[in-house]
Structure formats: C-alpha cells, structure tokens
Image (cartoon, rainbow, N blue to C red):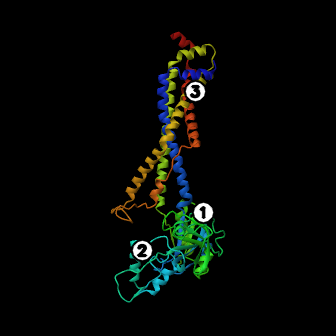
Amino acid sequence: MSVLARSVGNAFRNKIRTAAVVAVLAVAIGLALAMLVANQAVGGKVQELNASVGTVLTVNPAGAQGFDGGGEPLTTAQTATAAAVPNVVSVVGTKALRLETATAASTSTTGTTTQQAGPGGGGPGGGTSVTTNLQAAIDAGTLGTRNNASSSTGSGSTGTGNTGTAPAFSLPITATGIGAEVDTSGKALNITSGTGLGDYTVASTKALVGTTLATKNNLKAGSTFTIAGRTFTVAGIFDAGTTFGNNAVYTTLAEAQALAATPGELSSMVVTVNSMDNVDAAKTALQNALGTSKADVTQGQRNLQTAVSSLDSVKNISLVAFIAALGTAGLIILLIMVMLVRERRREIGVLKAIGARNRTIGLQFVLEALVLVALGSVVGAAIASFASGGIASALISSNSSTSTASQRGPGGGGFGGPGGNPFGGASQLLTSVTASASPGVIAAGVAAVFGVAVVGALVPALLTARIRPIEVLRGE
C-alpha cells in the first residue's frame, strides 16, 4: 500500500474523532481566513485613501471668502510655484463663476429692492456673476428665501419701503472653470454620459452639466444653452453625488477666465499630494512658497486622517487575530499528531522493524495531517465566505464608535445639531469597506494554513525516529 493511500486511510480510521478534529480545525481556519479577508479589504481601503481622498490641499487668495472677503487674486503663474513643491503631484487651477437666470437677474435690479449678487458670494476666492438661460435645479425653499431676505436688508440693498415679504428668488448655478478633468475636491469627474472637454487649458464652448441641472433644463449630450450671450454645447453629463454639486456647470479654465474678463486669474488651486503621510509637510512648504500674504492653504478633509487611523487599527487587529487563529490551528495539529504518534507506537515499531525508513513514516503522518487540514479548510473557507463581511463590519463599527466617542467635544455634536458627527463624511468611509472572500485571498490563507500544518505535523513525525523497534516489541 502506498504512503498516500495509507495516510488517507489512517485519517478516517476513527470517523467520530476525525469529524471532531475537522470541526475544530474548521472553526480555527474559518476565523483565520475571515480575519485575512478583513485585513486585505481594510488594507486596500487604506491604500485608496492614502493615494487619493485625503491628499488634496486647497489654495485660496489670502483673506478671500466669496464676496465678503478681500485680498489679491491668485494667478496662473503661481501654479508653477505650487507644482515645484516637494511631494506635490498635480496642481489644477479653477475659476469660479456664478450663473444667474436672466429673468431672475433682471427682476432683482428692477424691483423695489436692489440686491447684491446673492448670498454665498461665489465661494472662496471670489467669483463673477454672469447670466444664463438655464434654470437652477434647486428650489430656494425656506432656507434660500430666508438667506436672500437677510442679504436684501444689508449694505448691498436699497429699499423704498418694507413690505414684509421677500422678493422672488432663484438660486444661482455654480460654474467652475477647471484646468483638468477633476472637481474642486481633486477627484476625477464622474461623467455618466457624453465625453469630457478635451483640452481643459484652452477656451472652448463645450461644457459639462450636472445631472439634476440637465434634467431640470431637458439637456443631454449635444444640447445647447447660453452663458453671457454665448452658446455652449453640452459635451457630457456628470454626477457629483449631491444635489448642490449637480446644480453646476464645468467649463475649461480659459473659457471661464474669458467669461469673467479676468485672464490669468484663478479663484483657487487644487493641489494633490502623493501621500497622506506627506500632506502636512507639503502644506507647510506650499504656504512658504506662495507666501502667507498671498495665499491661504487649507486641507478641507483633514478629518479623513482620523478615518485612516481607525482603519489602520482595524487592519492591525485583524492581522493579529489572523496570526492567532493560524497559530491555534497549528497547535491543534501538533496536539493531534502527538496523540496519534503515541497511539501508534506499536505500528511504527513494526514498520521500522520490517525496514521502513523514518522519512517514510514521518511523511505518512504529515500527509495524514494535511488530509485533516484539507477537510477543515473546505469547511473553514465556507465559514469565512459568510462570516468575513460581518466580522469586518463589527471590527470597523467598534473601532469607529470608540474613535467617535474620543473625538466628540464636551458639548457633543457639531454642525447640523447637537447630535452631529464630528467626523463628518469620514465616518461613511469607515463603513464603506466591503470585505469579500475573493479566491485569491482564500487561496493565500489556505496556503498559510497548510504551511503551519506541515510544521505542526513534522514535530511528532520526527518523534518517530526516537522509537526503537526492539523496545516496542519487547513491551508487547
């Protein structure tokens, strides 16, 4: 009988014990594989965040804040200075515009109240208001009407009397000229239909329109609309993910500068750093290079560092748990094989007496252990495929809850009410990790389990060399 056939037969010699061993191994292996899957998923998310989401710096003119701020505008020439800063991989200039529906703009200047360009001021760095035939996709509602009424009574308005009612108000449409196909957060634009603008550095009458704005105005790729009397063609429709973000238009940077009659001026710069680890150093270097009197450098998503820190903790915990579960499986194999060697001393003695080599006998026990591990791995992989997602979610939820509690101030909450989340959007990243038991990860985990099993089986296998046939047979 071959060594392999004898090993398989020995593995099923005691079916009840085999079932019990396989069940225990399946739990240990399943837990190890689930932790490995969670570790790989969290590690992938951390790499994604480090490479993109948390690496964006925003540069605005020093002292600027919409129409309420001051200072001198940024210039296209300053993008070269920013690009020369170490660890900076890209610099995208933007020019902010605000599009007001032509009828609404004329009403605001001919009524009893002459208003400013509207609340909000066009964003950091200032902006220029121009007319368009587009209708805003967002209704003013209570908040828009209230804000408009507040601005109407300020220094920018002159009234002939107080009627007690706010004038009709149409929200402006955000328009941004950009030098590359990215939004103002540094992410690539999500174009759902049509194409991009091609060369974003030259003047062009092509434009990208947000989904809700396109729906409101019955626009699609190839449709036309006007800005400041010029006809623009919709090159593509994009989805920014929010209602406000989709009430927007993107043009090329040169075209926006032409519409605003400010060639060479920028409202802001979007600076991308090569890694989140280098963001702080790049921010300091960028501020020094541009000058504190010329520009303000901010990191709009700094709370993402907390999210990454929490995910790193989950990654470390899952790695430790994987190693512990793997060690447990190895210990189980070791104990089982030691027990089998002691039980089969007479059988080993007889085999050695008839000329069997220690290597052959040891290989038999290793193969028997691998048979048990193979069975446990099959069941364990099934357990991991169902449990890995839940285990990862539990680890992440527990860690994010602890971090949130430690970050919450004495008064609780933040913007948006007493129960506000201090993490803001970062908390969503903690729950956006999807742990799926991919074949590659499972195969790597099973290979590690087999490696540990071989080590665990070799120890008792080597004990067979100490068994002397004459002593065993004499005892019989």
Q: Amino acid at mark 3?
A: Val
Query: Which is closer to the viewer, label 1 or label 3?
Result: 1
Q: Residue at x 48, y 28 (%)?
A: 21
Residue shown at the point (55%, 54%) measured from the top left: 47
Mark 3 residue element: helix
| Amino acid type at mark 1 | Ser
Check disc 2 and report the residue beneath it.
144
Check disc 1 and report its element: helix, strand or loop.
Answer: strand
Which element type, helix, strand or loop, lies under badge 2? helix
> In the depicted view, which residue is nearer to us: 20 or 321?
20
179 w.r.t. 438: above or below: below
- Give coordinates of residue 419: x percent, y percent: 35, 61
Q: Which mark is residue 363?
A: none
Q: Which of pointers 3 and 2 lies earlier in the amino acid sequence?
A: 2
Label 1–label 2 contact, CB within 8 A: no
Q: What residue sits right under mark 1 in the picture?
A: 193
